[in-house]
Amino acid sequence: MNPSLANFILRKTPDFIINPTSMTSTAYTLNTGAKIPALGLGTWQSDPGQVKAAVSHAIQVGYRHIDCAYVYENEDEVGEGIKEGIQKAGIKREDLFITTKLWCTYHSRVELNLDKSLKSLGLDYVDLYLMHWPVPMNPNGNNEKFPKLPDGSRDLLNDWSHLQTWQELEKLPATGKVRAIGVSNYSVRYLKQVLEIAKIVPATNQIENHPYLPQQEIVDFCTEQGIIVEAYSPLGSTGSPLFKEGGVQEIAQKHKASAGSVLLSYHIARGLVVLAKSVTLSRIEDNMQLVKLDPSDVTALDKISQSKGVTRFVYPAFGVNVGFPDKPDGKLLKQTL
């Protein structure tokens, strides 16, 4: 081939094709010293009958971070996928980073909920255990996961605070069942409350994050405190208009990448972990095709929420104010020990 033509093709070829592991091998260091892979497979809304194959395939093609939760009601099958994936990929359990989460009705029974997840997943330990929401609910209500009062509102545990829950979480590393602990869906206000009483600083804060909801104030605060931010729902909602945003499309054309690739890469460019959810095997592979965005790309994506407004897609009907500026309504829960 003509050398000039070869150099031209090389210049025009996306980096993820020339260096396919350059972005997917990115990892961050938690405040425990452990490494957390920047790209993880999310399992929320992954239906039974599909999630085993998805998890197994993800591990076989190179994912080393799997994100789970008790409330997703699929941990048995996720566990089967982990076992199969490890076997077929020829790796060890310790090569994976696995997260699960404490559900709201177990805030006063933390280790019990952890044990349930470990049994379902078929694991002796998880690498990270998160408080899913800082919203304690009645453990003795009319439903194990979503208890309601006669008026249809959530049955909350009014005499228990998220701070008490954090103190229970702090007991877990000594059991050997978890390697690190963290939080999820925490606002700056709630983070400050935890840090005032914490003996162990949360390792991560997992929040909804995408260009419609960059939550930069939380990202900045976590960075100052040495807390890694994990982005869930990084593409927005299913069928999100984010894919059609002019700014996203322009960056995609610039990097010869898909809109989805740009949206996932946006988080890694900001130093965040990103959780990409899919049960479609080809899309699981596509989600590994990350690109290196430059600062101007990140600035352009940041500006989308400034012009289009903030949109939060995930906010359960707890009827509670947990400190997010865009969700000022709701009941204030107990916030003291």
Image (tube, helix red, strand yellow):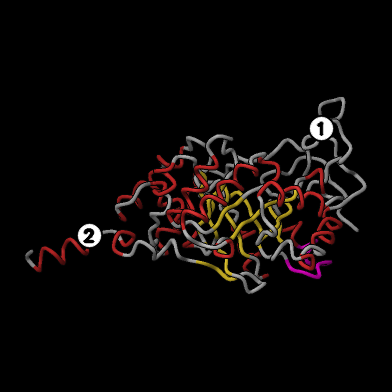
Q: What secondary structure is the stretch in magenta mostly built from?
A: helix
Q: Is residue 153 above or below residue 296?
A: above
Q: Earlier in the sequence, mark 2 or mark 1?
A: 2
**Disc on res. 199:** none
Q: Amino acid at mark 2?
A: Lys
Horizontal arrangement in the rendering, residue 115 relative to residue 336 (left or right)? left
Q: Residue at x 36, y 46 (%)?
A: 249
Task: Look at mark 2 in the image and give the residue it sits on.
Answer: 12
Residue span colored magenta:
192-201
Task: Look at mark 1 in the image and give the residue it sits on.
Answer: 143
Q: Amino acid at mark 1?
A: Asn
Horizontal arrangement in the rendering, residue 15 relative to residue 197 (left or right)? left
- Residue 117 x, y percent position in the rendering: 71, 49
Q: Residue at x 74, y 50 (%)?
A: 102
Q: Is residue 263 above or below residue 12?
A: above
Residue 158 magenta-highlighted: no
- Residue 89 x, y percent position in the rendering: 46, 57
- Label 2 environment density (alpha carbons within 10 Å; few <14, some 14–19, many ≥20): few
Q: Secondary structure at mark 1?
A: loop
Q: Is residue 4 above or below residue 287?
A: below
Q: Secondary structure at mark 2?
A: helix
